[in-house]
Image (cartoon, rainbow, N blue to C red):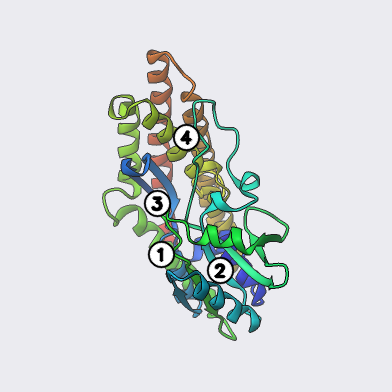
């Protein structure tokens, strides 16, 4: 979302990430198991998978995506767009970026092996290139300053074969309209979509999925071996649910809270601020759950681990009821 926000700004539209998340109805909850990729349990609070389709459709932005096995064609496509003064979004593998240490989540317990940490679904924006020195100029949402990256490093990040999200030299090209649609109806429709995310999706999503996680997290020590349990608590809960920069903190709940405050002024609906406070409380809960998960990694005593996971379970269940209340109240504004 951050890279797309940067592209919007380049085209004259100063949206916040919170606003983009909110108007596309991106808030949700997902609890999946990816054991074959070394991530036995995975949680997220936003529907990133369809974000671009949803937001571009809403704002009447035309976009196309291209993938290729040819590194030469992939780079030629980027240069062609840059020469037209069009910034280009690229999918890259984070661990191959030369500044990876600056954007990765730090503070891992000693039990966590971060030497092979990677994520191939990362997006950066190329704004220029220098053939003479073989450098590209990019913006990465994880850093404030523009980065200079060698062609070699960028190619390596674009052609990674690491699963589950190999980049495949993917690029995105966006064509913005001269004017944007009115937001009132879009905002109210976004509330409907958000509510549907929590009640009408597959079984691994929504309120029932939160309650499934609350029920299962206490069983994780029996479901997973030691390494899998560590990865589930660190990656599945702490990193993807809280610490990764793209989450906005607290399963995106704080970001959605700020969105509701912002649109309360557009819609002139002060009661939305009350709902925003509930989502902010939910965000605090998810942050607490994340820290419990992180600390549980270092617990050696079986009984103490069971206690910690029971506290996390109770907090997840409590949060599901908080969010159910917020969603029920949000329905009034659809």
Mark 1 and mark 3 lie on one chain; the one further toward the N terminus is 1
Helix or strand or loop: what does disc 1 sit on? Answer: loop
The image quadrant where one finds the N terminus is bottom right
Mark 1 to mark 3 CA distance (whole Å): 19 Å
Q: Residues within 10 Å of mark 3 (few under 14, many from 20)?
A: some
Residue occupied by mark 4: 234
Residue occupied by mark 1: 50
Q: Are marks 1 and 2 in contact (CB under 8 Å)?
A: no
Mark 4 to mark 1 CA distance (whole Å): 25 Å
Q: Residues within 10 Å of mark 1 (few under 14, many from 20)?
A: few
Mark 4 and mark 2 lie on one chain; the one further toward the N terminus is 2
In this rendering, position of residue 213 left or right of residue 2: left
Mark 2 to mark 3 CA distance (whole Å): 20 Å
**Relative to 4, is 157 above or below?**
above
Closer mark to the observer between disc 4 and disc 2: 2
Q: Residues within 10 Å of mark 2 (few under 14, many from 20)?
A: many
Helix or strand or loop: what does disc 2 sit on? Answer: strand
Residue occupied by mark 3: 163
Instruction: Note whether residue 58 is visible.
Output: yes
Residue occupied by mark 2: 89
**Relative to 71, is 152 above or below?**
above
């Amino acid at each position: 979302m951050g890279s797309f926000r940067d592209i919007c700004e380049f085209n004259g539209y100063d949206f916040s990430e919170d606003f983009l998340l909110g108007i596309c109805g991106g808030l949700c909850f997902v609890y999946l198991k990816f054991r074959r990729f070394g991530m036995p349990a995975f949680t997220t609070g936003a529907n990133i998978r369809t974000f671009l389709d949803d937001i571009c459709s809403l704002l009447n932005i035309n976009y196309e995506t291209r993938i290729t096995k040819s590194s030469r064609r992939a780079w030629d496509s980027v240069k062609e767009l840059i020469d037209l003064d069009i910034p280009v979004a690229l999918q890259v593998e984070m661990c191959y970026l030369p500044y990876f240490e600056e954007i990765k989540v730090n503070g891992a317990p000693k039990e966590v092996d971060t030497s092979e940490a990677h994520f191939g679904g990362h997006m950066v924006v190329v704004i220029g290139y220098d053939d003479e020195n073989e450098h590209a100029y990019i913006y990465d949402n994880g850093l404030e300053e523009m980065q200079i990256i060698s062609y070699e490093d960028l190619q390596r990040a674009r052609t990674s074969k690491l699963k589950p999200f190999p980049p495949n030299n993917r690029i995105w090209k966006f064509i913005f309209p001269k004017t944007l649609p009115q937001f009132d109806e879009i905002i109210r429709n976004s509330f409907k979509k958000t509510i549907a995310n929590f009640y009408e999706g597959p079984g691994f999503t929504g309120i029932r999925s939160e309650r499934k996680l609350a029920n299962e997290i206490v069983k994780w020590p029996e479901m997973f071996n030691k390494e899998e349990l560590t990865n589930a608590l660190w990656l599945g809960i702490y990193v993807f649910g809280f610490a990764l920069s793209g989450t906005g903190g607290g399963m995106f709940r704080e970001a959605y809270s700020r969105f509701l405050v912002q649109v309360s002024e557009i819609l002139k609906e002060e009661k939305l601020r009350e709902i925003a406070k509930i989502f902010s409380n939910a965000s605090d809960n998810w942050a607490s759950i994340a820290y419990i998960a992180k600390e549980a990694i270092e617990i050696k005593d079986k009984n103490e681990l069971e206690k910690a996971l029971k506290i996390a379970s109770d907090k997840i269940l409590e949060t599901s009821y908080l969010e159910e209340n917020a969603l029920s109240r949000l329905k009034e504004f659809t």
